[in-house]
Image (cartoon, rainbow, N blue to C red):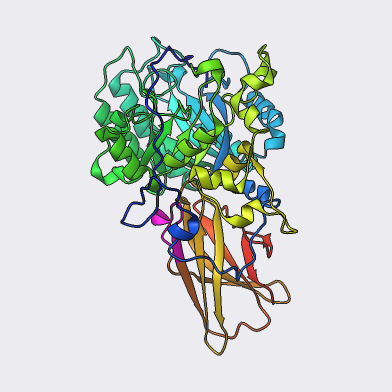
Amino acid sequence: MHKRIAAAIAALTSLTLLFASCSSEEIVSDSIKLPADILAAQPDGSIPILTGDQTAQLRGNIDRGFRLETYYTLGSGEAWPGDGIDGYEYLNDMLAFYSEENVREIQVYIYLKEYYDRDLDQHALDQMKAFFEYIRSKGMSMVLRFAYESDQNSEYAPKQKQLLRHIEQLGEWINQNLDLWYDTVTVFQIGMIGAWGEFGSSNVRYNRGKIVNAVCAMVPENTYIQGRYMVVTQEADEEYAARVGYHNDFLVGRPHPWNTAGGNNDSEEYQEFEQTNKYRLNDGEMPWAGGTQEPDEYVDGKKLIQQLYEHHMTTFSLEHNYREFIKGGAQPESYYNIMRYRREMLSLDDVKALGVPYYDAYFTDADGNPIQHSIYDYIADFLGYHLVLSDLSVQSGASSAVSLMVTNYGFGAPLNVSDAELVLIDASGNEESYPLAGLDVKTLCTYGQQTLTAEIPHTLDGYTIGVRFNRHGGYHIQTANALGYENGVNVIRGA
């Protein structure tokens, strides 16, 4: 994001790490709790688990992980307003630049700057549809925001009446393109007001509560929403509040005044943030390199991991503090924190000491040898959900039953999953599916466990058995299990 470089800030208190579970009793301890102590039940290993040298394949899952960033201006078709660069060309350059990182998420700013004082015309709506379709063709999903002002103190802020009219038009467009929306939008950021649509200061005065709730009403009910600041999210009416999460764009591994809930972890705002964030989709980013205001620009990777866990982060920017130097900067690689995290390693003992999510197999290779992971890889693997299937029970007969357990080791919950189904595949490759009962993604947050069950009206002999997690919009979820994954099906037992 083309935004401010941070002003000087005062040093604050050190980060307090809170263990998070989905039970009604919060786990808070000065000592390190191991998963065996936190989990309601220890997975039994009846469904083989991917070892740590295989889990990079899980980064193909959508709705989670590192994200990129791009821009598209309705009207001109430029990327950043006025930069003269075609929006598609910029996006393609971005995808090429980050091709080796295998990122599926991208923050997209749709700029309405050229329409700040008039209604969106059909040309703009057609441009938006084509751009969404192009995102879909790339197999990606968006952290989406609309904005007008591309800098501070801009003259392109719409009056409130015009802004509300645009929200109305966008809502109509979404309803007309609902399948496309679900195919391409992971989460929607409230945005609209102020520089970069951050809902910050603007030269126009707005009834901000009215704008927030108009935006929430515009967004389909199965889409989660994010706000930059607590004063934004707290404006959401009760009917929307349960799906309004947080976008924190100043993460440096410790409390900071520019964090979503501020820099005081004892404040009422922080307590509300801590109690709700595990049940939301949350996004974050570091400051641009040079803007952290930390000594020598150094952000401790281990403390950042703790903060990402504490905030139950689902997506995290790979644009910030990673590879800016390749784009024309003059600093050495060590100046860029995420680049440094690719070389800094974590052991099993390290994550135990940090109190962040893990399971033993993640730190073991296929031959049973202990391995380490870079801080970069650990973050890439545990942002959002990280699901493991276990405790398989199969009763086969004239009427059959299957049960299994799902455990989430990720920082966040798989909130965009709509349902799960048991899939049976016969020797000819034909499929039949049956609903799996027991899945409640709204509570399947870190270390959450749920038992899933299905009933089948015939024998299971001769069938390969699998599980398919369906996402709103046609994508599926791969679990960290080792019997195979194809056509969205996680195999849990061979024929």
> Is residue 413 depicted above or below 197 in this figure?
below
Residue at 67 percent of width and 50 percent of height: 57
The residue stretch that appears in magenta: 439-450
Q: Position of residue 263 (x, y in %)?
A: 35, 26
Figure quadrant of residue 266: top left
The residue that appears at 40% across and 15% down in the rendered structure is 9
Q: Would you place residue 64 above or below residue 198 in this image?
A: below
**Is residue 481 part of the magenta span, yes or no?**
no
Which residue occupies the extreme right position in the image?
367
- The x and y percentages for residue 421 are 53, 67
Q: Is residue 266 left or right of residue 38?
A: left
- Percent position of residue 393, x then y: 54, 77
| Coordinates of residue 280 in the picture (x, y in percent) | 39, 45
- Viewer-side residue, 116 vs 268: 268
Along the viewing direction, whichever of 197 and 174 lies nearer the viewer: 197
Give the quarter of the figure containing the C terminus. Answer: bottom right
Whether residue 391 is visible to the viewer of this picture, yes or no, is: yes
Left or right of 190? Residue 150 is right
Residue 402 sits above or below residue 206 on the image = below
Q: Is residue 240 left or right of residue 341?
A: left
Residue 105, located in which quarter of the rendered image? Answer: top right
271 left or right, relative to 421? left
Answer with the quarter of the image where residue 130 lies. Answer: top right
Given residues 77 and 262, the one toward you in this image is 262
Farthest front residue in view: 31
Q: Residue at x 29, y 38 (%)?
A: 271
